Image (cartoon, rainbow, N blue to C red):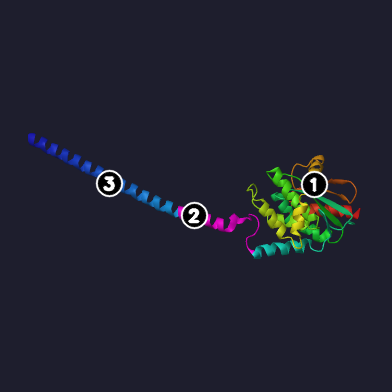
Amino acid sequence: MSSVGNDQEDLTRKQRREQARAERKAMEEAHAASAARRTRLTQLGIVVSVVVVAIVVILIATGGGSKKGIPTSKHERNSVVSEVSALVGGIHQSGNVLGSPTAPVTLQYFGDLECPICKEFTLGALPTLIQKYVRAGKLRVEYRSMETATREPEVFKNQQIAAYAAGKQNKAWNFIETFYHEQGEEDSGYVTEKYIQGIASQVPGLNLAQWSGDRSDPEFANQVTTDAQAANNNGFTGTPSFLVGHSGGAMSKLEYGGSPENPAPFEEAIEKLVKA
């Protein structure tokens, strides 16, 4: 009996050893698997970091896919100048007005030079209106100031006055169009004196010395204030906003509905007035 008991005890000890060995092996395998996972995660982290760095470098090099102000290359600047000149060149300008003084219809365009939606209108619907109606002598467009997107009132005042001062030499629309073409990222503080000077330097034929002096003329500061009052009187809350009517007559709000890049609502309103 004792022999049988000893055999059973030896068997039990052997089983315990085997169980312990199996447990150690399982633990070793678990540790190995965990180490392999950590290695894979580390490698993946390195790959992700490299990709992120590459993306950042690309975004920096490309400006994040959007313009951030004055073009740095001469080719880009010449391209903007050519585009603006093709759009407004040869059209009568007087102060902040583009178009013939005898045009039967007037469109008042209330805008903020830093407003991205104004840029959409200026580069979207407006060129069609200029080509179809302004060049034909049917429409005159009057640019007016309304602060919405520009965060600092003094910056807003300076940039709008700079445009009106260019109008003293009948170049306001060249300045306005160039500004919108080269508009920077909203709320980035890109509008500095250097930026404003850079816009003016791209306006063909603008006497910069005269323009600099004209910017101090109180007439233009008063005009910005008058524009703000007109916008308020008409209940405008955002830019771009529009008034349209027979030149010299009563003006009414023009609601463009959806996208400011679509010229159709403007064409419809202008056509009605031209026919009337």
Label 3 packing within 10 angstroms: few (<14), some (14-19), many (20+): few
Label 2 packing within 10 angstroms: few (<14), some (14-19), many (20+): few
Q: Amino acid at mark 1?
A: Pro
Q: Give the residue drawn at x 68%, y 57%.
A: 198
Q: Amino acid at mark 2?
A: Val
Along the line of sight, which residue is nearer the eye, 30 or 249?
A: 249
Dividing the picture into quarters, in which one does residue 137 lie?
bottom right
Range drawn in magenta: 49-73
Gap between marks 2 and 1, in whole Å?
A: 50 Å
Q: Position of residue 50 (x, y in %)?
A: 46, 55
Residue 28: mark: 3
Along the line of sight, which residue is nearer the eye, 102 or 71?
A: 71
Q: Give the residue drawn at x 77%, y 55%.
A: 166
Q: Is residue 217 above or below residue 16?
A: below
Along the line of sight, which residue is nearer the eye, 41 or 205?
A: 205
Q: Position of residue 111 (x, y in %)?
A: 75, 48
Residue 258 is left or right of residue 275, and the answer is left
Residue 57 inside the magenta-drawn segment: yes
Q: Position of residue 225 (x, y in %)?
A: 79, 43
Q: Position of residue 73 (x, y in %)?
A: 63, 63
Residue occupied by mark 1: 218
Residue 4 is left or right of residue 189, and the answer is left
Count every numbered label the image shows and give the total.
3
Q: Is residue 118 visible?
A: yes
Residue 197 inside the magenta-drawn segment: no
Label 1 or label 3, whichever comes before in sequence order: 3
Q: Is residue 251 above or below residue 135?
A: above
Q: Nearer the viewer, mark 3 or mark 2?
A: 2
Q: Amino acid at mark 3?
A: Glu
Residue occupied by mark 2: 53
Gap between marks 3 and 2, in whole Å?
A: 37 Å
Dominant secondary-structure state across the stretch colored magenta: helix
